Amino acid sequence: MKKSKLILGSLLASTFALGLTSCGGRQTLLFLNWGEYIDEDILDAFEEKYNCNVSMDLGDSNEIFYSMVRSGTTVYDVVCPSDYMVEKMYSAGLLQKIDFSKLTMSGYNPNTPEGRDSMRLGVLSILDDMNTNLKANNPDYVDNTIQNYFVPYLWGTWGIMYSTSREDFPEEYKDYVPGEKSIREAVTNGETEWSALFDRSSLPEGTRVSMYDSYQHVYYAASRYLEKTNPLSNAYGIELPKSDLDTIKNLISDMKYNSWGTDNIKKDISGKNSDIGYMWTGDFLYYYCEEAAKAAIKAYINGDVTMDNMVSMINEICDSSDRVYENNGNKYGIRFDFFIPEDTVAFCDNLVITKDASNVDLAHKFIDFMSAYQTSASLDDNGEEIDPSTLEEDEILTPCFNNTYYVCYDAWNKTVYDDLVALADDSIFNEEAAEVFEEQISEMPAEETDLYGLLYDYVTGIAFNKYYQKDSTKGEILATFTQDYIDQIYTAFNNART
């Protein structure tokens, strides 16, 4: 039976033990993971397949992951840190090598030509950055050693989600002021793209700005902003003098952000409670696809769109500047968009096994299972769930269709990325889809119908073409600073907030 709890930053100084024991002889895998990240149905399937338990703790930052693993109070088997934290854990001797011979998907080994050929260019770029960083900071480091200690799981970038409609503003700020920039203009201006997060004068009056509650990410964005507005060249990646840290502190303090948060920021913008927010791309994409699918369903029910012009409607609300489709006086659309600066944060979250893991073999099985198989919605012709272990290699279903944005690889002969892009295929909206919808809508919510799923998939294909380009190598990973400098950043960050 799974056990899950959230470990917040305020618990960093506390110590506690789970006190977990095996139940009925079943092994218990201890997994430290991010919140809102993995469908727990996948964990259920793993428990059933291997007759074990998975106890999952949830952390809200890489720094918490490091603190928890280093303290040893709870000896986790598998952890999911980002790239720079893998570097730090490796350097501190907290990880053990992955035995790639125990993984059924040989294409997940970055040390082999097959593995590198299967990976997205963005993932390879991050792997190479990690290796370069370790070589620069450790004269005894052997080239490419780090690649033996993790399996890439999720790749992405960071950017700025913003409202596209002034109608979402509080009442006193809805009226347009002549000559005033729109939020879109402020955010997407390549010369001042970071200004939207640190300079209120670049935004329309009344804009509500939310900042991601991670000092590493705020520090990165502020450094990039300073590079473009101050005589600081290449400010990020080096340890800045106290005077520059004070400048960053003042930037944060002067902005007086309307809110701080993590997973809630995307919800606030989608729910009209915020106008701009800093987050990773996947957070935005989930709501983007959901909002477009809901809009199309609503228009179809209202008779403002038919199956014949469903595709043109979706394309209009995804590609037009105002994200709106209008018919018969009714408006449908997406009220927000996303911008990814060229010099943004890129990241890859990875599955690692800790040095003192108690269940090493089970940890390998878990990583293999999470990385190689789609573990739900895989049904045979009789409607029975397929056991992935019974499939041939060319029949294996990859996990990206279950975890839509977690695409690091193509697998064997299955081109995952291209299959996702191919979801944007208008042949799925036909008479049969209409008939099924009419049967289902009287029995279930619209969001549970097959048509909603088809619409969501179609928008996913559009989204991957637009925001997750196949060969994109935007951004760079967060730096691994000395603990003393991290403490200085953390102090400046907290002083700015208070």
Image (cartoon, rainbow, N blue to C red):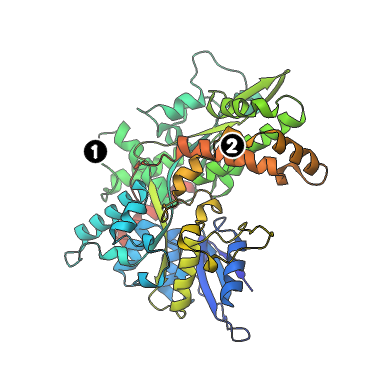
Q: Which structural element holds mark 1? A: loop
Residue marked by disc 2: 274
* Residue 288 visible at all: no
Amino acid bearing label 2 = Ser
Residue at image location 35% in from the left, 47% down from the top: 122
Location of residue 126 in the rendering, given as x and y in whole percent from the top left corner = 32, 51
Mark number displayed over residue 57:
none
**Label 2 Cα crowd, 10 Å radius (few <14 / some 14-19 / many 20+):** many
Residue marked by disc 1: 233
Location of residue 6 in the rendering, given as x and y in whole percent from the top left corner = 57, 63
Q: Nearer the viewer, residue 475 or 426?
A: 426
C-alpha span from label 1 to label 2:
32 Å
Amino acid bearing label 1 = Ser
Q: How many numbered circles are shown?
A: 2
Residue at image location 54% in from the left, 61% down from the top: 8
**Label whose residue precedes the other's in the sequence (1 or 2):** 1
Task: Choose top left, top right, bottom left or bottom right for residue 254.
Answer: top left
Residue at image location 61% in from the left, 18% down from the top: 175
Location of residue 133 in the rendering, given as x and y in whole percent from the top left corner = 25, 56
